[in-house]
Image (cartoon, coloured by chain):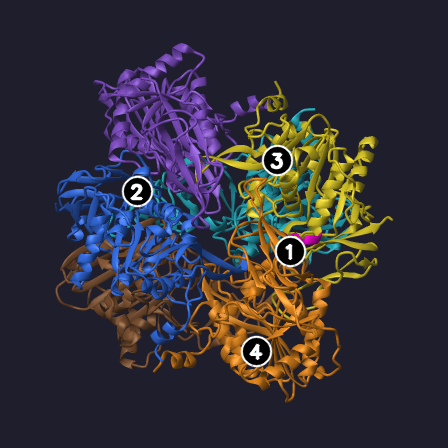
Chain colours: A yellow, B orange, C purple, D cyan, E brown, F blue
Amino acid sequence: MTQSLDKELRENPIAASVDFQRDGVQHGHLKLPYSRDDSAWGAVMIPVCVVKNGDGPTALLTGGNHGDEYEGPVALSRLAQELRTEDVRGRVIIVPFMNTPAFHAGKRTSPIDAGNLNRSFPGRPDGTVTQKIADYFQRTLLPLADVVLDIHSGGRTLDFLPFAACHVLPDKAQQEASEALMRAFAAPYAMRMLELDAVGMYDSAAEEQGKLFVTTELGGGGTSSARTVAIARRGVRNLLVEAGILRGEIEPAKSLMLDMPDGDCFVASEHGGLLEMCRDLGERVERGEVLARVHDVLRTGAAPVEYRAKRSGILAARHFPGLVQSGDTLAVVAEVLD
Amino acid sequence: MTQSLDKELRENPIAASVDFQRDGVQHGHLKLPYSRDDSAWGAVMIPVCVVKNGDGPTALLTGGNHGDEYEGPVALSRLAQELRTEDVRGRVIIVPFMNTPAFHAGKRTSPIDAGNLNRSFPGRPDGTVTQKIADYFQRTLLPLADVVLDIHSGGRTLDFLPFAACHVLPDKAQQEASEALMRAFAAPYAMRMLELDAVGMYDSAAEEQGKLFVTTELGGGGTSSARTVAIARRGVRNLLVEAGILRGEIEPAKSLMLDMPDGDCFVASEHGGLLEMCRDLGERVERGEVLARVHDVLRTGAAPVEYRAKRSGILAARHFPGLVQSGDTLAVVAEVLD
Amino acid sequence: MTQSLDKELRENPIAASVDFQRDGVQHGHLKLPYSRDDSAWGAVMIPVCVVKNGDGPTALLTGGNHGDEYEGPVALSRLAQELRTEDVRGRVIIVPFMNTPAFHAGKRTSPIDAGNLNRSFPGRPDGTVTQKIADYFQRTLLPLADVVLDIHSGGRTLDFLPFAACHVLPDKAQQEASEALMRAFAAPYAMRMLELDAVGMYDSAAEEQGKLFVTTELGGGGTSSARTVAIARRGVRNLLVEAGILRGEIEPAKSLMLDMPDGDCFVASEHGGLLEMCRDLGERVERGEVLARVHDVLRTGAAPVEYRAKRSGILAARHFPGLVQSGDTLAVVAEVLD
Amino acid sequence: MTQSLDKELRENPIAASVDFQRDGVQHGHLKLPYSRDDSAWGAVMIPVCVVKNGDGPTALLTGGNHGDEYEGPVALSRLAQELRTEDVRGRVIIVPFMNTPAFHAGKRTSPIDAGNLNRSFPGRPDGTVTQKIADYFQRTLLPLADVVLDIHSGGRTLDFLPFAACHVLPDKAQQEASEALMRAFAAPYAMRMLELDAVGMYDSAAEEQGKLFVTTELGGGGTSSARTVAIARRGVRNLLVEAGILRGEIEPAKSLMLDMPDGDCFVASEHGGLLEMCRDLGERVERGEVLARVHDVLRTGAAPVEYRAKRSGILAARHFPGLVQSGDTLAVVAEVLD
Amino acid sequence: MTQSLDKELRENPIAASVDFQRDGVQHGHLKLPYSRDDSAWGAVMIPVCVVKNGDGPTALLTGGNHGDEYEGPVALSRLAQELRTEDVRGRVIIVPFMNTPAFHAGKRTSPIDAGNLNRSFPGRPDGTVTQKIADYFQRTLLPLADVVLDIHSGGRTLDFLPFAACHVLPDKAQQEASEALMRAFAAPYAMRMLELDAVGMYDSAAEEQGKLFVTTELGGGGTSSARTVAIARRGVRNLLVEAGILRGEIEPAKSLMLDMPDGDCFVASEHGGLLEMCRDLGERVERGEVLARVHDVLRTGAAPVEYRAKRSGILAARHFPGLVQSGDTLAVVAEVLD
Amino acid sequence: MTQSLDKELRENPIAASVDFQRDGVQHGHLKLPYSRDDSAWGAVMIPVCVVKNGDGPTALLTGGNHGDEYEGPVALSRLAQELRTEDVRGRVIIVPFMNTPAFHAGKRTSPIDAGNLNRSFPGRPDGTVTQKIADYFQRTLLPLADVVLDIHSGGRTLDFLPFAACHVLPDKAQQEASEALMRAFAAPYAMRMLELDAVGMYDSAAEEQGKLFVTTELGGGGTSSARTVAIARRGVRNLLVEAGILRGEIEPAKSLMLDMPDGDCFVASEHGGLLEMCRDLGERVERGEVLARVHDVLRTGAAPVEYRAKRSGILAARHFPGLVQSGDTLAVVAEVLD
C-alpha cells in the first residue's frame, strides 16, 4: 500500500548470467537493460565472477564503485583470473567494476546519469541506471554476503595514504569483527573514517544489513602503481583468509593506526587558482604551518593565499590536480594513534 | 615576395604591457586580441614578469607550455613574487603559463584550437591563437634571450622521474654550454632526450636561434608535490646563478645521468583496457620482464595481455591513467650512464 | 492527502489550442510552457489535429512516440492534410509527433531530459518535459479515446519486419477487439509482442484504461520508405474503417502471424565491434546457425565472435548500425504461426 | 513516519560560515558539499553577507535567483560592501548570487543540474544541487526573515520595463504591507504580476510562510546598465528604510502602476525565424496593431508572419534575442492603471 | 605557377540559383556543397535576392556578416520583400544572412568551423566553409558591385551607439564618395572607425577593389529594436537613392560626427567578474572618471576594481553581458567632432 | 626550394609494423603518433594486413574511407582472416578501416579533426591526423600498388543501389583496364559516376598515379546486410582473380549498367522537414513525377513541398534519414544503359 512497500515488491531489472548457488568458477554479467539513443535494445553489462565451494560464508568484493579508482579493479581482476574452486570454502562474489559505465569512462560518476554510486543507496528499481545498480546490490547481492569489502582510492582529484578503514557502529560486536578484517587487510595505514556527506553510501547500506564491512583508500590521482596494487592484492587475500573463506596464511605487514577526530582535520580552499602543496603525503604537520598556497592565475606578482593546518598530525590526503576551485578540500591532517 | 618573407614582415598581434628594456620589476600581460562568440572584442591575457638590472645576459623562463604540467607554473610564480631588481644582473623574463588558455583549462592543449604549443613552432602571426603565441616567442621573445629554460612535467597522462635534459646539437660549443646549465639545475636525474615526434617544438626553435636551452620533466599526473616543486625552485635558481644572472651560490644536489639510446626504450600498448603496472618509476628493470598487463574491461577471467621490457635499465616514465588505449606509450626504460 | 491524490488534483500545464468537443477540422498545438536558458518564457509546441463529426467513437492516433521513427509521422501528417469532416463519424485525434522535442532532434529520446516517452507513463504534471507529456496523454487524451493506435518502427538502431501488434490482456473481450483492429490494419506481419522492459509504456497505460490498443513496428534504421509508408497509410485507414469512424471499405492485404514465445527469440552481444549479419530480415533461420559475427576493430586476423540462433524461425528484427556494443540485442527470431 | 516528515527531519547539508545571530558585519559562504568528477570533495560556495545590530526585523535580500539577471547582483554586491553595523536596526541578510552555479555560468539555470531555482521550491535536502539550495532557503533562511526582496530582471531572453511587483494574497494585511514595500521601492513601474507557471516559485514559498515579499523585473537581455542599477540601489535602500531596518530617508521617485489582467496580455509565436519588433518597451499599443513580424530565415521574398496585439496598453516586456522559436512569448502588453 | 595563381584559377564551389545578369526580381540561394556527418551530400544554402533593371550601378547589401547582429538581416529581409523592378535603375544584390551558418546559430562565428567571416578575407576556394564564403564574395560578388554596404551591430557581447562608418583611404576620391554615402545613410551618429585587429576584414577587401564602402554599428546585445531597425531601413534606402540606384528622395536625419583618434578611447578589463557600468551609451564622460567596476563573484565585501576613462568624450560602445573576463574591452569613449 | 619539394622531403610520421616486402601473411598496424589531452604519447593505430607471395602485381584494398560505411570493413576483415600466402601471386594490402578514428566513431568524418578523408588528398605530413593518413596513402601505399579498390557505401545519410564504378579518364587504356576490373567485380549495378565535389578525392590521387582504380557504393544507411556483404565479398575476390593476384575462378553475376549524364539526375531540397519518399531504390521514375514530399514539422495541415524528377530513369540513390535539411540531396535518378 505504501510507496516503500511498492518499491520492495517491484523486481530489479538486472539479470545475472551466473548462478550464485552453483559450485565452481563462473564468469558472467549483471545485465541491466538500457534503452537509449544509440541502442534502443541495449544493456549495461557489469562483469561478475562467482567462485563457490560448498557451504561457508560469502564475501562480496567490489572495486570501481567510483569509476576512476584503480587498485580495486586491478586486484580483483587478478583475483578473478586466479581463484580456483578448491581455494575456497563458501563463496566469493567479485564485481571489479561496480559502476561499470563510470569505470569505462574513467570518471567518478556515471556518464549516463551523473550518478555517484556511493551516494545512490538504497537505490530504486525504477530509477536511473546508477540507482538500479544500487538497488541490485541493496536487495540482491548484499543479502547474499557475510563479509563486504569495497576497495576505494582517491580517484582523479584526491590522493590518500594507503589505508583500510571501518566505521564506528552501534553494534559493537559487528564493529569489532569488522575491525579484525581491517587489521587482517594490513594496509600501511588503518583509519576510522569521518564521512563528510554520508547520505546514500554503500557502506551504510552494508552495515545496516548487519554485514562485516571494510573499505579502503589506497592511493589516488586516477592511476595505480605496482606498490598500491600489491597492497590491495595482499589485503584482499588476507581478508578472505581471516574470514575463513580462502585457504592459506595471512601475510602480515606493519599498519599505522590513524584517526580523524573532528572537522579540524580538513582544510578547504575559498579561492580558485594554482595549487602549491607545502607538505607531501605522510609528512609530519604542525598546527599553524602553511600547508598549501593558492596562486593567482590571471597575473604574476600577487601574493598567494596561504592555508594553514588547524591541527598537528600527518598529511593523510590532498587535493590532487594542479589547479583548485573554491570549495575544494585541500588537505586532510590525521592524528597518529599508535 | 616569398611566403616566408611575408610572414616575417607581418606584425604579431600580441602587445606586451611591460617594457622589456626598462630596469626594475614589472608585472604585466602579453595581450592577444581574440574575437569570439562570447567576447567580440576580447583578448587572451598571458601573464609576464620582467626583472631587469642593467646590462647582462637574458634568461627566458617558461612553464605551462603544456597546460597540465604544474612544477613550472608554481616555481615561476614564486620566483616572480620574490625576485628583486638588485638580485639580478641582466634580465629575467618569466612566462609561467605560456599556453595560458590550456593552463586555465588544465589541459595539455588549448581549448580554443586544440593547439599543442610545443608542436606549433615557428607559428604564424595570422594563424590560430596557439600559432600566434608560438610566433610571438619565435620572433619577439627568443631573440631577446641568451638562455632559455622550459619547465615540463608529464601532464595528466604521463609520469616521469624528475630530470633536466638537453639535446644533442650540431654546434658542440652550444651543446656543452647547455649541458653545463642542465648540470647546474641539479635535478635528481639528467637526460639526453630522444624526441618521438620533434616537428614544431619550442626546443628546436630556441636551439636553431643559437640559444642555450634546457628543458625538464619533473613529475606528472597533472599535479605537483612539495618535493617536485622544491626541485624546480632549486633548479631555476641554480641555472640563473650558473648563467651569471642571479647573485648567489649554486645549491648542489646529486644527479644521475640517464640515456635513451634507441626506440627499444619505449613500450607501447596495442590493446585498450585496464592498466596494471608491474614496476614503479625508478625501479630496476631487466630485459624480457613483464612491465605491464592490460586487462579486459568487458569481462572477468580473460587472460591479460602482457607487455615486456625490450631492454634493461630503470623505469623512467610511464602512462599515468588507470585505463589505456591502443597506441599509448606504456613505459620508458632508460639506461643509467653514471 | 496522499501523494497519489495530490498528483491527480494538480493540473497538467499543457494547454490545447484546439477544442476537442467542436465539430470540424482543427489544426493546433498542445502548448507546454518550458522555461529554459534560451527562452525564459518559451514552450514546447506539440502539433495536434482534431477531426470531429457528431457522435461516435474516438480514435487517438500517434506517431513519434520515439523521435527517430518515421512511418507514423509521415502517414499521420498525410492523414491530417487529407481528412475532411464528412469522412468521419465520431472523432479522430492525430498527434503525429508525440515526443516533439525528440522528433525534432531525430532521436529516440528527448534532448531536453533524455526522456524515453514510452518508458515515462503515467508521467507527472510537475515532472520533466517528457513526464508532463506522458501525464497529458494519461489524464487528458486517453480518457477521450475508445481506440488507440501508436505507430512505431525500429528507429535508428533497430530494423523490423513490418508488423502490427497487440498484447495478451486479462480482459479477453478487450484483447479480441484489439486483435480485430490489428488484423484490419493488414500489415505484412502481425505479432503478439513480448516486451523486454515494460515499465512505463504507453501501451499499458492505454490498456489499463480499457482502450482498444494497437501498436506497430513498420521498419527502422531512422528512415522510412515508399513501401513502409504505404503500409502505414493503408493500416491507419483500415483501422479507422474497422472502428466505424472512417467511411469507406477496408483494403485487404496478406498478413503473416508471428509469435515470440520466450526469451530464446533474442540474441544479444557480449562483445563490441564490427557487426556482420549472416541473415537478412524475413529469411528463414535454423536453431544453431550463425546469425551474426562480431569482428575486432583494433586489429585484423583475429577470429570473429559468432552468435548463433537459439531457436528456428524467421529473422524478425536486427540491430541496425554497423557497429555493435556489448549488451546490444543483435537479432530476434520469431516463430511463424500461420 | 511519512515521507513528508522524513524530509523535514533530514538536515540540509549546507553549512554557513557566518553566524546569523551575531552582531556586526560578516562576509562568508553557504557551503554545499558537491562531490563530482572534477572534485571528489568539492563544494558549491554561495557568498553571503549578514549585517546585524541588536533586535529588530530581518530583511532577506537576494539576486541571482536566475543566473543571467544582473541588477540584483550588482546592487547587492555594492550594498554588502557599504553597509555598516550602525546603519542597521535588526538584521540584513544578503545573498547576491542565489543560484551561484547558474550565476557563474551566466545562465538562467544551473549548469550542474539544469535546475531553475525559481521553479524548485520547496526543494529537497537530498535532491539535486538546485533543490538543496531551495531547501536551505525554505527551511533555514526564510524562517529568519520578516521582509523578503528577490531582485529579478529579464535575463538573456527577455527584456522588461523596470518594475517592482507583488502578488494578490489571501491575507489582505500581508498583501497591503507587501504593497507598501513595493511602493517604497519606487521603481519607474509597479505591477501586480500574473504568473504563467507558478509551481515551485520562491515567491510562493516566502508568501506561504507569511513573509512580506517584493519581487522585481528591472530590465533584461543578460546585461545591466547604470540606469537600472541605480533603480535597484535606490529601491533596496528605500525598502529597508520603509521596513524600519535601515536608518535614513526614503528617496521618492515617480512610479506608474501597471496591470496584466488576463492572458490576452501575452503574444506568443507559433513560428521560428528572425524577429522584427514593431514597438519598443514603454510604447503605446493599440489592440489589433502589428506588434512583431517573424521572417523566414531559409529564403528571401517570403511574406513574414505578423503577430498583433490582443489588447491595448503599453509594451511591458518582449522577447530579447534576434531569433525566435515556436512557443516563445514575443510580447506582453500591460494596462496602465494610474 | 605560384600558389596565388593556383588559387585564382580554382573555381569557387558555390553555385548561385539566381542569374545576376537578368532583369527583374529574383529570390534564390548561393549553394555551397558541404559534406558532413549528418548529410554526406548536403549544402549550405545562403539566401540571395537580386533586383535588376537595365544598366546602372550595382549595390551589394549585406547583413549577418556576424551571425548575432540583427538590424541588417531585418532591414534587408524587408527590402527584399518590398523592392520592385521598377523602383531600381541598375542592380541591387541583397544577402541578408551573409554567414548563414552563424546566423542560424545566433552566433558571431560559424558553428561549422568557428570562422569569423569578417576576419576570413580574401578566403580560399578550397578552405573551410567560412573561407569559401569569403572567397565567393572576394572573387564573384565584390567585382559585380560599385557600392557596398555591410550592416553590423554589436552582437551578443557589445552594444553601440547607432552609427554609420567609413575608413580613411589612400584614394581620397574613393574616401570622399564613400563618406557621401555614409552621410546619406543618416544614422544618429557617424564615425571614422579605428579597427583593433584589421587582418582579413570584408571592409578592406571591398576597399582594395576600389568599391565605395560603408559599414555600420546600429546597436547590439544580440537583439534589434523597432528604433534601430527603422534607422537601418531609412539608411539603406537613403544610400541607394544617393547612389542613383533607387528612385525617390533621401529622408534626412540629424547625425552627430564622432571620432576615435587613438587607443586611449578603449578601456579593457584585466579582471574577470561582475560588471557594473557607471555610464550609459551616449552619456558624457570626463577623463579620470570611473567608467566601470568589476566585482568579485566568489565573495562579498571585497573592494571592486575600478576602471577609469583615459580621455573625455561620450560613451560610444560597451561590453554588453553582465559578466566580464580578463582581456575584454569594457568601454569605448569617442570624441564628438561636430 | 619550393613548398611542394619540402613536403615531399619531409617524412610521414606513420610507421608500419608490417614489412611490405616480406612474403607471407602479416597482421599489424600503421602507427601514427598523436599527442593529445587524453594521451600525451598516444597514437592512432590503423590495422593493416599484407599477404605476399613472390613477384606479381599489388592490389591495395580499402574500406572505411568514410567511417560509417560497413560493406568494405566487413568484407575486408573476412578476407584478412581467410587469405593464405599460397592463394596469392604478388601482393594484397588490406586496410579495412582506412580512416580508423572515423570508423571507431561510426561517423563519416574523423572525430579528431572533422576530416573527410576522401576530400583530404594529397594530404600533408605535417597536417591534421586525417591529412597525415592521406599523405601516407599518397606517398607510401599508392606507389606500391597496381590495382586499387576502395569500397564505399552511402553511410548514415545516403542509400544507394549496389554498384561498382569507374571514372572517365584521359588515358583510355587505363580507363578500359579499370572498367574490366569493375565488370569483374560484378555488383548488381555498374556506374560511371559524376562527382559533385571532386577536390581532394582518393580516387583522383590513385588515377593520377596511373593506377587501375575501382570504387563502389554498395548500400548505405550506416548499416550492412548479409546481401550487400555477399556482393562485396564476391566482388573483391572476382577483382583479385581478374587482376591475376588471386588463384581461382571469377564468380559471374548479372550487372546492369547505369549512367548519370548530367546535373538533372540530382534532386535537392530547399526546405527542412519530414521527408516522404514516393519511390524506392531501383524503381522506375518518369520525368515530372513527385519523387518526394517535405512536410512541415511545426504544424499539421500545411501542404507539403513536392519535389519532382527532372529526368526519367531509376532511383539510384536517396537521402536516408527521416528528416531533411535545406540543401540536402534528396534523390538521384540514373539512366539505365543496358
Residue under label 1 = A325
| CA gap, disc 4 and disc 3 | 53 Å
Asked if residue B333 shows in the view, the reply is yes
- Residue holding disc 3: A49
Where is residue F302? Give x, y as percent.
26, 36
Task: Decide whether the magenta segment is chiefly helix, strand or loop.
Answer: loop
Tell me if residue E310 can be seen: no
Give the spatial CA distance, label 2 vs label 1: 47 Å
Tag 3, which chain?
A
Figure quadrant of residue B145: bottom right
Q: Nearer the viewer, residue E292 or F250?
A: F250
In front here: E196 or A171? A171
Q: Are marks 4 and 2 on the same chain?
A: no
Who's the residue at 32% across and 61% down the image? F55
**Mark toward the viewer: 4 or 2:** 4
- For the point 14% across and 43% down, which residue is it? F313
Residue placed under numbered mark 2 in the picture: F320
Q: Is residue B18 left or right of residue A246?
A: left
Which label sits on residue B168? 4
Locate residue A116, reporting x and y percent.
62, 41
**What is the three-letter code of the residue carrying label 1?**
Gln
Which dot, 2 or 1, sits closer to the camera?
Answer: 2
Q: Nearer the viewer, mark 4 or mark 1?
A: 4
